[in-house]
Image (cartoon, rainbow, N blue to C red):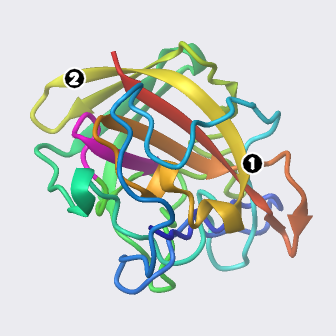
Amino acid sequence: MTTGLLAGCASDPAANESGPSPSGSNGIPTSVPGGGSTPTGGTPTGGTPTGGTPTGSAGESDPQAASTGVNGAAPEASAPGGKTKAAASAPAQLQMPTIGFDKAVTKLGLNAKGEINPPAGVVQWYDKSVSPGQPGISVIAGHVLYNGPDVFYKLDDLNAGDVVTVTYGSGAKKKFRVYAEEAISKKDLQKDPRVWGSSATPVLALITCDSASRVVNNRHTDNYVVWAKPI
């Protein structure tokens, strides 16, 4: 499905940006590039991320909103077969020990502009995606910059093999292992099936802006995505 991702993060201390959002109406994309699912390696259809790791964090700015870096209307992430799967238990806490990260997770949808754009200091679980660990692709987003470093400022320091732990509202925990990271243009990310497509196996996609990318109108042109699968 087509998605608009984090619109941007504030690269200017006086400005904020909006996050990524899939394109479409009411969070449903108008088209899904590449269908089906890939059962092996927890990799969604549409190809395997290259694993290239940009040097910066995502960050863009809009005088009115800060963001994780996803623009547009966000499509519903799908379980295998294209059906949206309800989360069994929502994620409540996200931990990434190798970068000293331990933050609460907030369930949120799209803003009025159809963007994934959490408030400053908030880690957002996109509520139209599956809960982490369920078959399908779970999307969690946060700003890299919002009038200064924000929640995902060090996201690009994660490397393949690093562990990510999700704690659910029920108190249960699940560990994921990073297998790929990539900087992707915001335009391409809106229709990237590795984030907005379906997967027969659980995939966790962490998204922010890529602060190493070009800045146009106070917004970075790229997003930064980290993919992980259950251990």
Q: Tell me if I can see residue 8 in this picture.
A: no
Residue drawn at 59 percent across, 18 percent down: 160
Residue type at numbered disc 1: Asp
Mark 2 Cα-neighbour bin, 10 Å: few <14, some 14–19, many ≥20: some
In this rendering, the answer to whether 202 lies above or below 118 is above
Residue 139 in magenta? yes
Residue type at numbered disc 2: Lys
Give the structural element (helix, strand or loop) at label 1. Answer: loop
Mark number, residue 210: 1
**Residue nearest the viewer, comparing 152 with 27:** 27
Residue drawn at 59 percent across, 20 percent down: 99
Read off the magenta span.
Answer: 130-140
Q: Is residue 31 left or right of residue 120?
A: left
Residue 23 percent location from the top left of the image: 51, 77
Q: Mark 2 touching mark 1, by CB under 8 A?
A: no
Residue 43 percent location from the top left of the image: 44, 35
In this rendering, the answer to whether 202 lies above or below 84 is above
Question: Circle 2 sits on which residue?
Answer: 173
Quadrant placement of the N terminus: bottom left
